[in-house]
Amino acid sequence: MTSRASRLIHTGRIAEVCEAAIARVLGGKKGETGPVQKIFLRMDDNRCQVSIDSSGEHLHRRGYRQARVAAPLRETLAAGCLLACHYDGSLPLLDMMTGSGTFAIEAAMIALHKAPGRDRDFAFMNWPKYRPGLWQQLLIESQRKEKSAISAPILAVDNNPKAIAVAQKNLENAGLDGLIQLSCGKMQQLQPQFPPGLMICNPPYGERLGKNASLNALYHDLGRVYGTTFAAWQGAIICPESELIKTTGVSFSPVLRFLNGGIKVALLEKALT
């Protein structure tokens, strides 16, 4: 409940009156238990906007990421970054700091035309006129559009064995076990195994994993991987537009700007030479 530039400013009282009115119209009783339905009220310039939450859990929660590692990237942000890089599954993809496997899993779902969130529940499923049969029909139609196999390899690499174990568990939850190549190793030792594709990563950038961490050496190595070892590959990286990215010695240009964990970052794409 929010109120701005309106005569009604006591948000608690507004919410109380609206709750009583809704209960009176729908026949609900005070203290009655049941599915929780969020209703948002916004007073703006003496006009009231009423919004009903149809999702329930946030949409980035696809349902597969039950295990995670430090500083994970939201699933929706990962998918948005891949699409902004024009990824469609036709070329190889390498995530060299995979963490909990989010980039790789979202890439596989894009490549397979798998609808995100199809395996989770939504708040609208508790609405009085929700039609389970219609929803099942929509799921069947989405399944018909899915591909049975990935046409280009997806590689997910991390130097932390625990992260690889977490990613493997999330792959299984997403029904993608065996479709993504998971590997434990250092990104500094990577070599191209396939024709050029998209290389993407979400590396540490201090604010997330300790402000005193020295990251210059890491970003110098990233520059060698992006600029030399995988020079022919399309490259993208998520990090703040700061002096740190200049340490790579690679020319990057911003494609998207957004907040990740409250930190201003950008999806930066490597200039191909």
Image: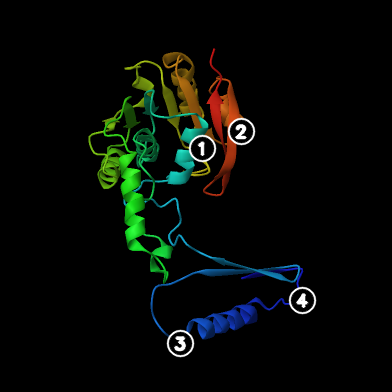
Which mark identifies residue 242? 2
**Residue under numbered circle 1:** 205
The residue sitting at 50% across, 29% down in the picture is 85
Badge 4 marks a residue whose secondary structure is: loop
**Residue under numbered circle 3:** 29
Distance from disc 1 to disc 2, alpha carbons, whole Å, reads: 10 Å
Picture coordinates of residue 94, whole percent (x, y): 38, 27
Badge 2 marks a residue whose secondary structure is: loop
Amino acid marked by disc 1: Tyr
Mark nearer the viewer, 2 or 4: 4
**Residue under numbered circle 4:** 7
Mark nearer the viewer, 4 or 1: 4
The residue sitting at 46% across, 84% down in the picture is 28
Foreground: 47 or 213? 47
**Which of the 4 image quarters holds residue 221?**
top left
Amino acid marked by disc 4: Arg
Badge 3 marks a residue whose secondary structure is: loop
Give whichever of discs 1 and 2 has the lower sequence position. Answer: 1
